[in-house]
Image (tube, rainbow, N blue to C red):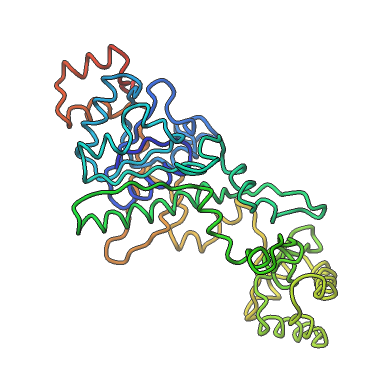
Amino acid sequence: MRGISRVLPGPHLAMMMADHGADVIKIEDPKSGDPARVIGPAEGGHTVYFRNANRGKRSFAVDLKSEAGRGAFMRLAESADVILETFRPGVVERLGIGYEAVCARAPQVVYASISAFGQSGPYRDRPAHDLSVNALAGVASLSVDADGKPAMACLPPSDMGGSLMALAGILMALLRRQTTGRGDCLDLSMFDTVVSWTPHVAGRVFAEGCAPDPSSQRTQGGAAFYRPYRTRDGRYITLGGGEMKFVEGFLEAVGRPDLIPLGREPAGPAQAPLHAFLEETFARRTRAEWVDWFAGRDICFAPVLDLKEAFDDPHLAARDMVMRDGDGASHLGIPIKFREEPGQIDPAVPALGQHSTAILREIGYDEAECAALAREGVIRQAE
């Protein structure tokens, strides 16, 4: 894979492929590289952010605005299975490295473009990151605080959804190529992705022609048995299942079977008395006391852990989802787990331009040509 992508969606996708054995060449701007190189706390010489989206790759720092840089890219494409780019629509065409140009020389390539709104449509050229995409897709209106103000989501659904959807598309195209011998062009919109994730909340829009009320949505807090509750020590727990067997199991255990019929009511105002009872009940004990109380009971329950608590949880260790390499640097684990051919983390994190010369030599440049491109600033070599 050759990836012209920065920050999160593209790099995360490419790293997942690297974790499973793909040779991933990260193509970077020779002057600044990926902005994630300097975003957030650092550990072991690299930011945690950059390491956990770019481990196991090789860095080729090349000026794609130069004729010589474009020429190197096109020669690199000839040996590629996948090209991934995350520029705004139209940029790769203006550079002369778009799908049509690549396909003419490398018809086997699966060319994947991830953008905020896609390669067509009125929003095609609109700049946006995850928050703006979610706002225009309508999903930011569904997570609100008590005053109805949209809440900032911690995880970026359109970023990560775009990464996973593009990965699925790339793999389908590679499978199809086994029959046709030809690649394809994938237009992946983060906006399209997050819209496609709304079947559980689209009911009123499609069936009644109106927007849903977040406070009445089953998955937004309208269901008494599917929401967080504050405990006596100011921490939080969650009830995470409104199926009647869970409702009955809890209410019978706390001596209030008379409230069971409320659990059968639709999410929203009809369940308000049950919600009030649960708020009062959970405020009587600490989070730890509730953890002990729920132990062994068949009820969907979980304490709200902070990220440090979650990363220290033995279940993550058992699943190899938080790891340390030989130098003690931290890594998020591999979520795609095969039995016969499991992924394996390569903890190496490339310096900007670390592999530029080696990659040029692989595609036929001699030593003198590599040195000339370095002198002219077309490529950057790691110091």
Report whether 121 appears left or right of 264.
left
State which quarter of the image contains the N terminus. top left
Instruction: Using the image, determine if residue 22 lies above or below residue 367.
Output: below
Give me the residue at 43% from left, 45% from top.
12
Instruction: Using the image, determine if residue 105 lies above or below residue 191.
Output: above
Could you tell me if residue 328 is visible in this image? no
Residue 356 position in % (x across, y down) = 27, 27
Instruction: Using the image, determine if residue 372 lies above or below residue 241.
Output: above
Residue sitting at the far top: 375
Front residue of 273/80: it is 80
Instruction: Using the image, determine if residue 17 lies above or below residue 198.
Output: above
Give me the residue at 37% from left, 32% from top.
92
Give me the residue at 29% from left, 23% from top.
69
Front residue of 380/252: it is 380
Tell how many labels. 0
State which quarter of the image contains the C terminus. top left
Residue 241 position in % (x across, y down) = 65, 74
State the image quarter where residue 303 is shown.
Answer: bottom right
Residue 313 position in % (x across, y down) = 55, 60
Report whether 172 appears left or right of 363.
right
Could you tell me if residue 25 is visible in this image? yes
Residue 281 position in % (x across, y down) = 82, 72
Report whether 134 appears left or right of 181.
right
Front residue of 244/134: it is 134
State the image quarter where residue 111 is shown.
Answer: top left
